[in-house]
């Protein structure tokens, strides 16, 4: 239903903004992956992609890691629909743009508690930016694409030492 941002909306603007955000967020994620605060948090797959080889050493199963990351990416479709599709668009008619963006950002940031402090604080900015992106494009898909790419990228670069 288009009311909740299921359509592509303004796809030209959506793709342009997504590319601009990625040019900022991917280098930021790369730098963050090197910080000690992120060690042990990512890759989020944890031990689910590790197997014991015939020498008794723990190794990454690329097949399991790939499958995990595909589903991890899909997880962000539901995540973005919840916050930028259903919640934002549900509050928008009665609350208006600014209160609706701030209201969907708050539980989004709370969901990041327990992660690295930098990521938790960054989720406040990201929640607002993704809310504005959804309003401007009339779609949550661009936020899902952006959030999914950044999250999978963070997992992959954090797991690189194990691959």
Image (spheres, rainbow, N blue to C red):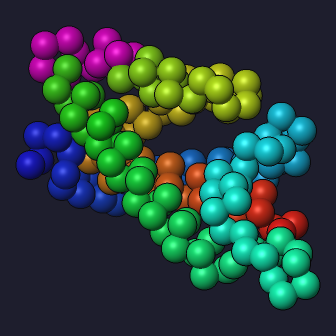
Quick one: 8 or 51, which is closer to the camera? 51
- Left or right: where does residue 110 sit relative to residue 27? left
On screen, residue 99 above or below 57: above
Say which residue appears at 69% left-offset and 55% top-offset. 46
Q: Which residues are magenta?
A: 92-103
Quadrant holding the C terminus? bottom right
Say which residue appears at 78% left-offset and 76% top-offset. 52
On screen, residue 51 above or below 42: below
Q: Position of residue 96 (x, y in %)?
A: 22, 15
- Left or right: where does residue 76 sit relative to residue 110? left
On screen, residue 23 above or below 132: below
Residue 126 in which image quadrant: top right
Q: Position of residue 42 (x, y in %)?
A: 72, 50
Residue 155 in which image quadrant: bottom right
Say which residue appears at 77% left-offset and 63% top-offset. 159
On screen, residue 93 above or below 85: above
Q: Position of residue 161 (x, y in %)?
A: 87, 66
- Residue 129 can be seen, yes or no: yes
Quick one: 95 or 62, which is closer to the camera? 62
Q: Position of residue 146 (x, y in %)?
A: 49, 53
Q: Does the segment drawn in magenta span residue 25?
A: no
């Amino acid at each position: 239903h288009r009311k909740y941002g299921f359509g592509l909306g303004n796809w030209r603007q959506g793709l342009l903004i997504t590319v601009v955000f990625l040019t900022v967020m991917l280098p930021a994620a790369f730098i963050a992956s090197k910080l000690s605060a992120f060690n042990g948090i990512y890759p989020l797959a944890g031990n689910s992609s590790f197997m014991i080889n015939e020498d008794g050493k723990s190794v990454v199963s690329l097949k399991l890691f790939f499958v995990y990351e595909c589903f991890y990416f899909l997880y962000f479709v539901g995540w973005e629909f919840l916050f930028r599709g259903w919640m934002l668009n549900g509050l928008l008619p009665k609350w208006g743009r600014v209160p609706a963006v701030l209201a969907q950002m708050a539980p989004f940031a709370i969901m990041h508690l327990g992660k690295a402090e930098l990521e938790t604080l960054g989720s406040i900015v990201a929640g607002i930016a993704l809310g504005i992106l959804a309003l401007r494009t009339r779609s949550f898909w661009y936020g899902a694409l952006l959030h999914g790419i950044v999250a999978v990228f963070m997992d992959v670069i954090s797991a690189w030492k194990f691959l």
